[in-house]
Every structure is written in structure tokens, then in C-alpha cells.
Amino acid sequence: MKLTTYILIIIALVITTACERIVLIELDELPAVSQRFIENNFSDTKINTVEKLRGEPRYRVRLINDIMIWFYKDGDWQKVERPNEVLSLHLLNNLLPSNIIAYLIGNHSDTGAISVWKSSHGYNIILNTRPDIIIKFDNNGYIISDSEY
């Protein structure tokens, strides 16, 4: 009986901890850098939810058009994704160095990006192909790899 009670307590703690990983917040609780990013790139799109996460990335914003944006703790964008539709060229021009845009137009003009993320090593882009193609670039926008995912 004590063992069953102990197991139930552990399960309750795990569920509680998992639920606390995401907290809904207001837009004005995001870092100012994140707020400006949304205003500059998505001013015509309504926000569905703004979430604070544990760890990095620290924040996630879901827009009504299914675009999701992840931000680091400092407010800089980490990832922009639209799983069912391609991201607009206008948005990609705002996110990526010009030589990445030129590479995409020159080598993948028949498809589009559904996910773009950046990290300390550079940029990663997933195209809406089957199978998915993931393209990796360094911080200066030079290609590292272009392969199926």
C-alpha cells in the first residue's frame, strides 16, 4: 500500500512539473526585442498565444495563420516555422542574409521554406519537399550542406 501511494505521488509530481513547463503570458511580457520582431514582421497577423517555456528557447508565439516563432531568453528570434505552408519571400528576406536568399532562388526556386532557425553555428532551412530537404548555412550565409532530411 505504501509503495502504491509513493508511486502515485511521484506520478503527480511528474505531471505537475510537465504542466509547468509552458505558461501563457501576454505579448507585453516578451522581451522588447521580440515584441519589435513581431511588430516588424507580423503586424498584420493576429496572435493566438504567447508562451513562456523553461530552458531555451524561452518563448514561443503562435500566430493565427499557423506560424510559430521561438525566441531566446534575450529576445532574439531562434526559429520561425509554418508547417503546412511556405514562409513568404518577404519574411525570408527579413530573416536571412542575402546570399542565402540568392542560393534558395538559384537552387530551389520550385519549392519554399517551411522552417528557418538560427543558432550559434548559422542557419538551417527546411524546404517543403518530400522527403524534406534541410539546408545548413554558416553565420555568413555560406552553404554547409544541402541534403534530404
Image (tube, rainbow, N blue to C red):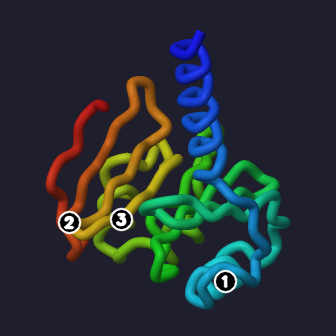
**Residue occupying the point 55% across, 64% down:** 89
In this image, 43 relative to 97: left or right?
A: right
Most extreme residue toward the left is 144
Find disc 1 in the rendering and name its residue.
35
User: What's the distance in space between the residues labelled 2 and 3, CA to CA?
Assistant: 8 Å
**Residue occupying the point 31% across, 49% down:** 107
Q: Where does the N terminus fall, quadrant-wise? A: top right
In this image, 47 relative to 76: left or right?
A: right
Most extreme residue toward the front is 2
Identify residue type, mark 1: Gln
- Which SS class for mark 3? strand
**Residue occupying the point 32% across, 42% down:** 134
Find disc 2 in the rendering and name its residue.
121
Of the numbered discs in the image, which one, if any, rests on residue 118? 3
Identify residue type, mark 3: Lys
In this image, 111 relative to 87: left or right?
A: left
Q: Position of residue 140 (x, y in %)?
A: 21, 76
**Residue 36, quarter of picture:** bottom right
In this image, 28 relative to 110: left or right?
A: right
**Residue occupying the point 35% across, 76% down:** 98
Q: Is residue 72 visible?
A: yes
- Which SS class for mark 1? helix
Identify residue type, mark 2: His
- Which SS class for mark 2? loop
Q: Residues within 10 Å of mark 1 (few under 14, many from 20)?
A: some
Q: Position of residue 139 (x, y in %)?
A: 22, 73
Q: Position of residue 40 (x, y in %)?
A: 66, 84
Q: Where does the C terminus fall, quadrant-wise? A: top left
Q: Position of residue 111 (x, y in %)?
A: 48, 42
